[in-house]
């Protein structure tokens, strides 16, 4: 078997095993520290009464699973550095070209999400957590830093004159667009969009976890196909923790991902797309995330422009399906099915473009 494949799947197997072993202890620690989910009473506009009715029973379920994924991922990075020093492997997971940006994103956005989770647990803030405006400002600052770093240090930049860099974006049918400096706002938008979309979708037991698993599986293959073996190994490391998480997150969930996980993993998904120059693949495999976000935007716009009138019973859309009578299991399984189909279509699109 190819040495790179052995290395990549070794990280996956090790992370999955470690995750399944330590997560029960982590859940007990969360319970001991009383780190439990608080169900919000206030919506962005008005009260979230129907949402409370559906999910009040989940109050105090342990949250902040994302904390353990960050610990385990960085533990694996540290071990890879040690193995490299010992001569057991050629390259560690700490690599400027392939993994720095992902690791910095997981750290910074995870920290932002962790603060939001802490505010939720302690009932801080009008809506039990960080306000939407503050969260967006934080995401914008981090996304801007990563966009500038990527554009000037990492991207496929082509020198065109003394200080003029040109950045090309790959589009369908083997075409590309030269974006130049406009690549930076596009990068920022993608990170903001993916972070918030996954965060919005994280609302039912096992829903966002499986959709993330499908998406990261696609990017594990794409990065491997582009000879970005360390990035692929990092994807498999995250997949290992997602598998461990889902083992304990199927209904009834024993703990939740929290913003520390959903924001960080969502933002990092956008990073994967930009590093591999596969934005249109991301749009396909992340279509459910996009639709969930659109449902929230439509709902808020309708409330503002139509004097409180709603399009959906509850937004995002997965809660609307619950409100009209679908069981939580039905909603999750059907969205999983759509997620699998989108992942397959995204893979086919990647190979054909």
Image (tube, rainbow, N blue to C red):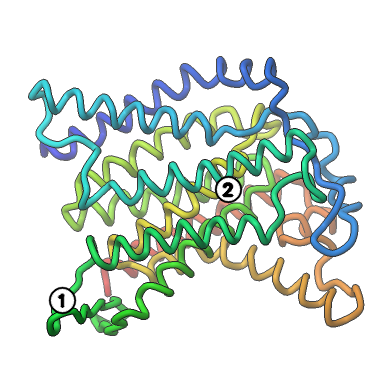
The image quarter containing residue 269 is: bottom left
Callout 2 secondary element: helix
Image x and y of residue 63, in percent: 65, 32
Q: Nearer the viewer, residue 249 or 197?
A: 197
Q: Write the residue at 56% across / 46% down.
A: 112
The quarter in which the C terminus is drawn is bottom left
Q: Is residue 292 left or right of residue 353?
A: right
- For residue 120, above or below residue 309: above
The quarter in which the N terminus is drawn is top left
Q: Which residue is mark 1?
A: 158
Image x and y of residue 83, in percent: 17, 24
Q: Is residue 322 left or right of residue 330?
A: right
The image quarter containing residue 233 is: top left
Is the residue under label 2 in contact with that under label 1 (CB below 8 Å)?
Answer: no
Q: Is residue 158 left or right of residue 43?
A: left
Q: Nearer the viewer, residue 347 or 51?
A: 51
Question: Is residue 1 among what the camera can see?
Answer: no
Question: Is residue 304 among what the camera can see?
Answer: yes
Q: Nearer the viewer, residue 321 or 290?
A: 290
Of labels 1 and 2, the one closer to you: 1
Q: Write the residue at 90% across / 45% down.
A: 53
- For residue 89, above or below residue 131: above
- For residue 245, above or below residue 278: above
Image x and y of residue 170, in percent: 28, 76
Q: Write the residue at 25% across / 77% down.
A: 167
Image x and y of residue 33, in percent: 68, 19
Q: Which residue is mark 2?
A: 208
Q: Write the residue at 82% across / 50% down.
A: 126
Residue positioned most to the front: 162
The image shows a total of numbered marks equal to 2
Callout 1 secondary element: strand
């Amino acid at each position: 078997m190819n040495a790179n494949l052995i290395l990549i799947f070794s990280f996956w197997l090790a992370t999955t095993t470690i995750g399944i072993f330590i997560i029960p202890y982590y859940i007990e620690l969360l319970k001991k520290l009383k780190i439990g989910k608080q169900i919000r009473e206030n919506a962005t506009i008005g009260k979230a009464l129907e949402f409370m009715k559906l999910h009040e029973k989940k109050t105090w379920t342990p949250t902040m699973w994302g904390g353990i994924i960050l610990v385990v991922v960085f533990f694996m990075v540290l071990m890879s550095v040690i193995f490299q020093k010992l001569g057991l492997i050629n390259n560690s997971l700490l690599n400027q070209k392939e993994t720095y940006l992902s690791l910095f994103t997981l750290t910074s956005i995870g920290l932002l999400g962790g603060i939001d989770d802490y505010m939720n647990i302690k009932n801080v803030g009008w809506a039990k957590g960080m306000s939407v405006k503050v969260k967006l400002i934080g995401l914008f600052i981090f996304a801007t830093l990563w966009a500038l770093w990527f554009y000037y240090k990492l991207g496929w930049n082509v020198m065109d004159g003394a200080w003029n860099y040109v950045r090309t974006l790959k589009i369908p049918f083997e075409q590309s667009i030269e974006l130049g400096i406009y690549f930076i706002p596009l990068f920022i938008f993608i990170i903001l969009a993916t972070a918030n979309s996954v965060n919005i979708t994280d609302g039912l037991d096992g829903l966002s976890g499986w959709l993330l698993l499908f998406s990261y599986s696609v990017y594990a293959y794409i990065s491997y196909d582009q000879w970005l073996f360390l990035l692929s190994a990092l994807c498999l490391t995250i997949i290992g923790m997602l598998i461990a998480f889902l083992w304990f997150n199927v209904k009834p969930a024993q703990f939740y991902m929290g913003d520390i996980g959903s924001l960080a993993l969502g933002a990092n998904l956008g990073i994967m797309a930009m590093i591999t120059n596969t934005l249109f693949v991301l749009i396909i495999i992340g279509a459910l995330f996009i639709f969930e976000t659109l449902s929230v935007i439509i709902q808020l716009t309708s409330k503002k422009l139509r004097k409180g009138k709603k399009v959906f019973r509850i937004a995002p859309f997965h809660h609307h399906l619950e409100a009209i009578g679908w069981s939580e299991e039905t909603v999750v399984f059907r969205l999983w099915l759509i997620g699998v189909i989108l992942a397959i279509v995204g893979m086919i699109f990647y190979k054909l473009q």
